[in-house]
Image (tube, grey):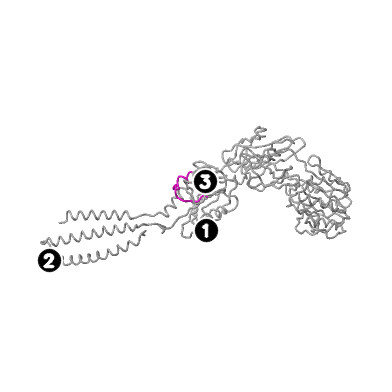
C-alpha cells in the first residue's frame, strides 16, 4: 500500500502514542481485576468501575475514528507499478496501407481499427497518432475524430523498421514519463523478416488485425508482347494468392468504351492476350471483378501516337548502316557531310552521330557543347586517321575521357556489359558467352575514368564507353576496318541509344517509384507542364531543354489513373499511373516469436491492458467506511453499555 499524502502519517504516528499508553493502562487494570477476587467483587458492586471501562471503550473508538480519517486523507492506494505521480505518453502507429483494405470479421481492417480507437480511448486523453503518410502530435481522439474517419489508404507503406523509428520520434524527451507505443497493422510479410529493437524506455504493444479471407486475385502487369504494322498484342498478367478461381471476367476499355472481354480460370499465375490495332491512340484500362482487395483490380495504360526521334548523322564515311537502323516509322533521320552541314539543324535533334570525322572543327565543337547542355545525346565514331589533338580538345571541353594513343593491332570484342541501361530491357534473354566476336584492325587506347563501359575488348580495354549521355567508340566501324556492322549486336546498341535520347512514356508508371519521361514541346518563359485528370492537377518536377521537357515523378500523382500532360490548357500526351502491387501479397508475419513486446489481436485488449497496468486502486473510501463503522459502534456503546 502506498500514499498520495504520506506526510499525514506523522499525525497518525503521534496519535498512536496515547493509544499505546492507554492500552497499557487498560491491560494493567484487567490483570488486577482477574487476580484479586475482592477487587472483582468491588468492581461489580461499584458502578464507578464499569463507567471507567465504558470511557476507555469510547476513547478507543474515537481514536480509531480519528486514525481512519487521517488515513483516508493520506489517500492510500495500490498499483502494479508506482505511477501515481508519473505522466504517461501514448503514441499510436496506424498502418493505412492498401493491405488494410482487406476485410476482417467486422469489416475492412482499417475502418474497423478507426472505429475501435474512437470507441476505446477516452475523448480527452492526450495521444499522438502516426500513419504511413500523416501524423497528429499531442492531440486527443475527440480533436481528430473527423480526420480519423476520413483517413485514406496510403500510396506507399513504410517498412516496419521505418514505422517504429518514425513513431518513436513523437515521444517527448522527458525521462520521468511512462511511454507506450501501440502499433496497429496486419503485419504483412514482404520477404524481409520483422525485427524490433527493444528500447528500455518504451513499452511496445503490437495489435495484429487478421483478415478472414486470404484469397486475392491481382492484375499484376501488362506489356506489348507482339507488334506488327497492322496490330499489336497486349498481354495481361494475373496472379492468384488463394483458392482457384473459375471464369474470372477480364475487361479492356478505351476511355469508357468496352473494347474486349474474356474470362480466365486459374490458380497461381496466368495471362490473357488482347489484340489491338496498331498506331491507334488508346487511353486504356483493364479491370477484373474480385471481392478482396480493390486497389489492384484495375490497371491503367496509354498508347500514344508515335513521336519520331530526330537523329542527325555528320559523316566523313558511309552512313548506309545508320540509314538501315533509323527507319522512318520511328525516327526522323537526317544525313549530312561535314562540309555541307547546316548548323541550324543541331538544336532540333535528339541524337547526333559523328561518323568517322578526321577532326572536330571548333565551330562544330561549340555547337555540340550547347547541344549536349540542352539534353542531347551524342555518339562518336572516330576515323582510322583521327586527329587526336582535335578529338581530345573536344573531350576536354565536355568532360570526357581522352584518347591516349592509337594501337595498330587486331583486337576482338568479347565482353558485353549486360547491366548497362541500353541492354537491360529485354535485349538479351540471357548472357551470351559464345557470340560471333567482331574484330577491329586498330583502335584508340582510352582510360575509363568516371565513364561506364558498354562493350570491351578481350584485354578489358573499352570498345564502347558512355559518360554524360555521350557514347564513344574507340575504333572506326566501316566494313574495311571492322566486322561490327556484320553482327546483330549493332542493332540493339544503336537503336537503344537512340531510344534513350528521347525517353517516351511507358505504357504506365508505378506511383512511389522514380519515373521519368520526355515531352517534345517548346515552353514559353516561366511556363510549366502540368498533370491533369478529373481529380485535379499537379506540377511534376521538370527540366526544360531546347526542344523537350524532361519530367520526373515519384509520389506525385498520388492516385492511379490516366493523366493528361498539358502546356497551359493544351494537352500534349497522356500518361498512366498505377499503384504498386506489393500490397497484394497476403502473407503475414508470425508475431509469437518476438520478445520484449506484447501482442494482441484487438485494440480494446491492448488499451485495457495499459489501463490495468497503470490503474490506481484508491483505498481512502474503505477507511471512511471503517470510520463510520467505528462511529456506529461508539453510538451503540453509549446507548447500551451500562
Q: Which residue range is magenta in the image? A: 115-129
Does the magenta run of residues contain 400? Answer: no
Towards the viewer: 353 or 172: 172
Crowding at dot 1, Cα within 10 Å, few <14 / some 14-19 / many 20+, comes out as few
Check whether the beta carbons of the residues at disc 3 and disc 2 lie within 8 A of each other. Answer: no
| Residue behind mark 1 | 198
Return the x and y of residue 365 as percentages of the image width and height. 82, 52
Does the magenta run of residues contain 121? Answer: yes
Towards the viewer: 306 or 38: 306
Q: Quadrant of residue 224?
A: top right
SS label for mark 2: helix
Towards the viewer: 512 or 591: 512
Name the front one of labels 3 and 1: 1
Report how far apart the C-alphas of labels 1 and 2 lie in the structure. 76 Å
Check whether the beta carbons of the residues at disc 3 and disc 1 lie within 8 A of each other. Answer: no
Report how far apart the C-alphas of labels 3 and 2 lie in the structure. 83 Å
The label on residue 210 is 3
Check whether the beta carbons of the residues at disc 1 and disc 2 lie within 8 A of each other. Answer: no
Report how far apart the C-alphas of labels 3 and 1 lie in the structure. 24 Å
Crowding at dot 2, Cα within 10 Å, few <14 / some 14-19 / many 20+, comes out as few
Q: Which numbered disc flags the more N-terminal residue, 3 or 2?
A: 2
Q: Which numbered disc flags the more N-terminal residue, 3 or 1?
A: 1
Q: Identify the residue at image location x=67%, y=32%.
A: 259
| Residue behind mark 2 | 39
Return the x and y of residue 422 as percentages of the image width and height. 75, 49
Name the front one of labels 3 and 2: 2
Amino acid at each position: 500500500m502506498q500514499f498520495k499524502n504520506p506526510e499525514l502519517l506523522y499525525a497518525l504516528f503521534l496519535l498512536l502514542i496515547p493509544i499505546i499508553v492507554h492500552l497499557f493502562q487498560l491491560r494493567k487494570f484487567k490483570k488486577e481485576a482477574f487476580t484479586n477476587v475482592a477487587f472483582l467483587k468491588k468492581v461489580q458492586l461499584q458502578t464507578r468501575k464499569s463507567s471507567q471501562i465504558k470511557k476507555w471503550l469510547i476513547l478507543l473508538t474515537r481514536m480509531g475514528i480519528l486514525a481512519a480519517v487521517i488515513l483516508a486523507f493520506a489517500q492510500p492506494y495500490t498499483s502494479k507499478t508506482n505511477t501515481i505521480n508519473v505522466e504517461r505518453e501514448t503514441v499510436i502507429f496506424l498502418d493505412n496501407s492498401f493491405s488494410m483494405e482487406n476485410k476482417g470479421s467486422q469489416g475492412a481492417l482499417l475502418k474497423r481499427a478507426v472505429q475501435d480507437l474512437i470507441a476505446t480511448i477516452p475523448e480527452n486523453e492526450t495521444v499522438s497518432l502516426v500513419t504511413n503518410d500523416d501524423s497528429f502530435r499531442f492531440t486527443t481522439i475527440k480533436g481528430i475524430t473527423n480526420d480519423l474517419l476520413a483517413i485514406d489508404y496510403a500510396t506507399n507503406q513504410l517498412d516496419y523498421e521505418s514505422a517504429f523509428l518514425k513513431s518513436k520520434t513523437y515521444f517527448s524527451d522527458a525521462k520521468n514519463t511512462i511511454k507506450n507505443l501501440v502499433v496497429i497493422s496486419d503485419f504483412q510479410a514482404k520477404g524481409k523478416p520483422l525485427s524490433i529493437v527493444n528500447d528500455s524506455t518504451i513499452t511496445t504493444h503490437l495489435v495484429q488485425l487478421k483478415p478472414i479471407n486470404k484469397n486475392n486475385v491481382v492484375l499484376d502487369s501488362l506489356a506489348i508482347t507482339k507488334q506488327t504494322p497492322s496490330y499489336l498484342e497486349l498481354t495481361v498478367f494475373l496472379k492468384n494468392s488463394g483458392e482457384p478461381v473459375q471464369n474470372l471476367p477480364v475487361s479492356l476499355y478505351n476511355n469508357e468504351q468496352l473494347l474486349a472481354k474474356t474470362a480466365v480460370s486459374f490458380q497461381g499465375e496466368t495471362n490473357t492476350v488482347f489484340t489491338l490495332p496498331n498506331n491507334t491512340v488508346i487511353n486504356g484500362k483493364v479491370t477484373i471483378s474480385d471481392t478482396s482487395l480493390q486497389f489492384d483490380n484495375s490497371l491503367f495504360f496509354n498508347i500514344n501516337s508515335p513521336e519520331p526521334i530526330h537523329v542527325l548523322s555528320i559523316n566523313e564515311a558511309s552512313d548506309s548502316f545508320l540509314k538501315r537502323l533509323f527507319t522512318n516509322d520511328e525516327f526522323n533521320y537526317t544525313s549530312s557531310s561535314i562540309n555541307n552541314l547546316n548548323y541550324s539543324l543541331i538544336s532540333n535533334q535528339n541524337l547526333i552521330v559523328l561518323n568517322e570525322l578526321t577532326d572536330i572543327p571548333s565551330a562544330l565543337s561549340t555547337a555540340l557543347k550547347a547541344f549536349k547542355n540542352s539534353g542531347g545525346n551524342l555518339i562518336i565514331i572516330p576515323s582510322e586517321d583521327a586527329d587526336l589533338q582535335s578529338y581530345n580538345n573536344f573531350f576536354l571541353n565536355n568532360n570526357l575521357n581522352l584518347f591516349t594513343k592509337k594501337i595498330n593491332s587486331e583486337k576482338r570484342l568479347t565482353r558485353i556489359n549486360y547491366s548497362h541501361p541500353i541492354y537491360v530491357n529485354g535485349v538479351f534473354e540471357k548472357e551470351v558467352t559464345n557470340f560471333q566476336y567482331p574484330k577491329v584492325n586498330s583502335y584508340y587506347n582510352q582510360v575509363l575514368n568516371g565513364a561506364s563501359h558498354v562493350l570491351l575488348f578481350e584485354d578489358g580495354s573499352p570498345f564502347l564507353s558512355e559518360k554524360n549521355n555521350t557514347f564513344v567508340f574507340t575504333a572506326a566501324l566501316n566494313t574495311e576496318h571492322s566486322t561490327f556492322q556484320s553482327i546483330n549486336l549493332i542493332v540493339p546498341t544503336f537503336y537503344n541509344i537512340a531510344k534513350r535520347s528521347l525517353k517516351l512514356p511507358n505504357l504506365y508508371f508505378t506511383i512511389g517509384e522514380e519515373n521519368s519521361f520526355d515531352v517534345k514541346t517548346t515552353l514559353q518563359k516561366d511556363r510549366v507542364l502540368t498533370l491533369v485528370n478529373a481529380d485535379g492537377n499537379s506540377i511534376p518536377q521538370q527540366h526544360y531543354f531546347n526542344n523537350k521537357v524532361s519530367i520526373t515523378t515519384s509520389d506525385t500523382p498520388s492516385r492511379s489513373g490516366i493523366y493528361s500532360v498539358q502546356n497551359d490548357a493544351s494537352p500534349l500526351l497522356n500518361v498512366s499511373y498505377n499503384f504498386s502491387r506489393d500490397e497484394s501479397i497476403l502473407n503475414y508475419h508470425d508475431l509469437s516469436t518476438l520478445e520484449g513486446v506484447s501482442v494482441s489481436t484487438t485494440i480494446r485488449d491492448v488499451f485495457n491492458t495499459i489501463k490495468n497496468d497503470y490503474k490506481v486502486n484508491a483505498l481512502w473510501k474503505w477507511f471512511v467506511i471503517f470510520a463510520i463503522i467505528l462511529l456506529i459502534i461508539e453510538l451503540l456503546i453509549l446507548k447500551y453499555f451500562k
